[in-house]
Image (cartoon, rainbow, N blue to C red):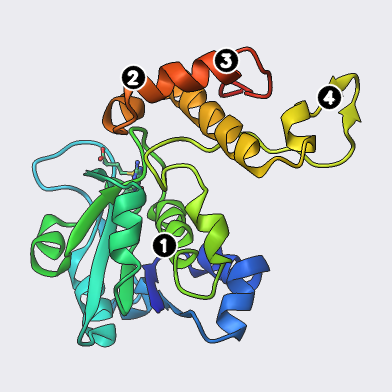
């Protein structure tokens, strides 16, 4: 899969592709990336990419012409142009899964007050918000989207670990522990040391349910978990510790 960034700040984006799991995915040719500097497509002496808004108001707006030229320079069959914006549809795990089936995503990164609407009308396929808050940069939001998408590609991460993560089945993830068994007087829940795989799976399921009810009741409502299951698991595991209750 290819990620093509259109940005005024290429140096904000490049380091992300040079570290950790992403760097390995690139080395193994599971991921490709390209970073295009929109400013290189401005034609005036000062390489101007923003201007005051028509109708007045605060801030500057990213100009249409350099962005249009930049987009035309990378236009290819089968790519989807994604623009992060707080005015977009909320980006979630389902949207990440949907985007992970694409051949190429073009990430159009906004700055200032945003991008001239005519670019959005002509070129943008999907507008996504990474949350109900305002960042100063589309680069950070685009990297959030890319990070959630590329890890779903075959071969990037062990398949089993994706299946058990938060949001993969509509619930938040259960808590994790590793050595030592006792840390500053806090012991690992004994069930995890028992070796009983069914008991462990049940306890983890209960932790997921309890945490989701407590931290994200909205998700729990939609999860499809039945009252019966909650009652059975609460009766058996309700008294055991281990949930961080969203800390
Ligand atoms: N004037 C815009 C508004 O009120 O909707 C905010 C512009 S923001 C300062 C600059 C850029 O950051 C946006 O063009 C967008 O690319 C990005 N951005 C900010 N918050 C975002 C969010 N919650 N989700 C996705 N992108 C965001």
Examine the rendered structure and indicate whether residue 49 appears above or below residue 227: below
Task: Give the distance between the C-alpha atoms of the residues marked 4 and 2, in whole angstroms.
Answer: 30 Å
Q: Position of residue 211 (x, y in %)?
A: 51, 24
Nearer to the camera, 89 or 246: 246
The vertical placement of 49 against 95, above or below, is: below
Q: CA distance from mark 2 to mark 1?
A: 33 Å
Give the left or right position of residue 174, taking residue 166 as reference: right
**Mark sitting earlier along the chain (1/4):** 1
The numbered disc on residue 227 is: 2
Which residue is pictured at 22% across the width and 54% down the height?
A: 127
Q: Quadrant of the N terminus?
A: bottom left
Q: CA distance from mark 1 to mark 4?
A: 36 Å
Please give the residue where the numbered disc 4 appears in the rendered image: 187
Q: Which mark is first along the chain, 3 or 2? A: 2
Q: Is mark 2 within 8 Å of ligand 1?
A: no
Packing grade of label 2 (10 A; few <14, some 14-19, many >=20) is: few
Image quarter hosting the C terminus:
top right
Which residue is identified by label 3?
Answer: 238
Query: Badges 4 and 3: C-beta atoms under 8 Å apart?
Result: no
Residue identifier under label 1: 149
Can you give x and y, in whole percent of width and height, for residue 191 in the image? 73, 30
Please report the residue visible at 39 percent of the width from the left and 44 percent of the height from the top. 169
Say whether disc 4 or disc 2 marks the residue closer to the N-terminus. 4
């Amino acid at each position: 899969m290819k990620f093509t960034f259109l940005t005024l700040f290429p140096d904000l984006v490049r380091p992300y592709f040079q570290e950790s799991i992403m760097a390995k995915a690139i080395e193994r040719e599971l991921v490709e990336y390209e970073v295009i500097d929109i400013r290189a497509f401005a034609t005036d002496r000062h390489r101007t990419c923003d201007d005051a808004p028509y109708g007045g108001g605060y801030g500057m707006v990213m100009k249409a012409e350099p962005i249009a030229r930049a987009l035309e320079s990378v236009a290819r069959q089968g790519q989807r142009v994604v623009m992060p914006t707080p005015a977009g549809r909320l980006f979630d795990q389902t949207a990440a899964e949907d985007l992970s089936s694409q051949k190429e995503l073009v990430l159009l990164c906004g700055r200032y007050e945003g991008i001239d609407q005519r670019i959005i009308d002509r070129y943008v396929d999907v507008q996504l918000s990474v949350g109900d808050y305002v960042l100063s940069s589309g680069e950070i939001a685009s990297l959030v989207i890319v990070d959630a998408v590329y890890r779903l590609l075959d071969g990037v991460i062990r398949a089993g670990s994706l299946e058990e993560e938060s949001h993969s089945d509509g619930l938040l993830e259960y808590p994790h522990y590793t050595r030592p068994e006792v840390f500053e007087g806090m012991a690992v829940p004994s069930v995890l040391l028992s070796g009983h795989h069914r008991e462990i799976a049940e306890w983890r399921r209960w932790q997921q349910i309890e945490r989701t009810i407590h931290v994200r009741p909205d998700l729990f409502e939609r999860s499809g978990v039945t009252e019966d299951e909650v009652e059975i698991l609460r009766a058996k595991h309700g008294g055991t510790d281990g949930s961080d209750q969203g800390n």
